[in-house]
Amino acid sequence: MPKSVSQILRGASNYTEKLDTEQWRAFSQGIKRKQGNWCASCRRSDIILNVHHIFYESDREPWEYADDEVIVLCTACHRQIHEQLKKFRKFVFAKLTPQAFQILNGALAVAYEKYDGLVFSHALAEFVCTPTLLERYAKAWEMTAKPKEDRPYVTNDPVVLTRATLKQKQGDHKPDWKNQK
Ligand SMILES: [Zn+2]
Ligand SMILES: [Zn+2]
């Protein structure tokens, strides 16, 4: 089960210090070597490369992650992915109550265990953009999930745009939760 958001935020303060240690340097050099010394996003190899954590767990040190839990990115792509994540979190927090977020967190934990990264991220975008899906999921757990207030979706939001793109590709397909016990 992933850590709660507050737990993650609490651990964030001394995080920067941890990246200034011999352990982190050895770990990140090893990861870059193993993953081919290039940016996984833009494929460039002639620039400064960072090691990015795909997720964090507050009881783990930054270097206590497996090879497939981190990814090598150049500084520009790394900054970009964090900006997108920030926007995404803002989007999620603006629309969900803490309880609904808890349900979402649980649902994502299940999805992360069961499906590959691409399916997971598509499901995530769809899930977050579809309040009724969240409500159905909550019902299945015998919980209630209600939006904080009615807010119109912002059309230039990257997550909404992702959803629009997905819809174009998938037609009007909706996942059937009943068959996914
Ligand atoms: Zn890059
Ligand atoms: Zn990162």
Image (cartoon, rainbow, N blue to C red):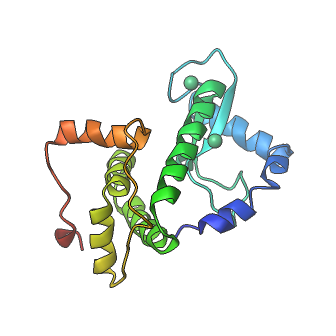
| Ligand 1 picture quarter | top right
Residue farthest to the top? 46
Q: In this rendering, would 70 be left or right of 181?
A: right
Give the quarter of the image for residue 111. bottom left
| Quarter occupied by the C terminus | bottom left
> Residue drawn at (80%, 45%), measured in percent from left and top?
19
> Residue drawn at (52%, 47%), measured in percent from left and top?
68
> Residue drawn at (54%, 67%), measured in percent from left and top?
2
Please say if 51 is above or below 134.
above
Residue 143: give x, y in percent of width and height: 37, 82
Please say if 96 is above or below 162.
below
Residue 28: give x, y in percent of width and height: 70, 39
In the image, 149 versus 93, the foreground residue is 149
In the image, 179 versus 101, the foreground residue is 101
Residue 29: give x, y in percent of width and height: 72, 35
Q: How many marks?
A: 0
In the image, 95 versus 56, the foreground residue is 95
Q: In this rendering, would 52 be left or right of 146?
A: right
Please say if 166 is above or below 55.
above
Residue farthest to the bottom? 142
Q: In this rendering, would 127 be left or right of 78?
A: left
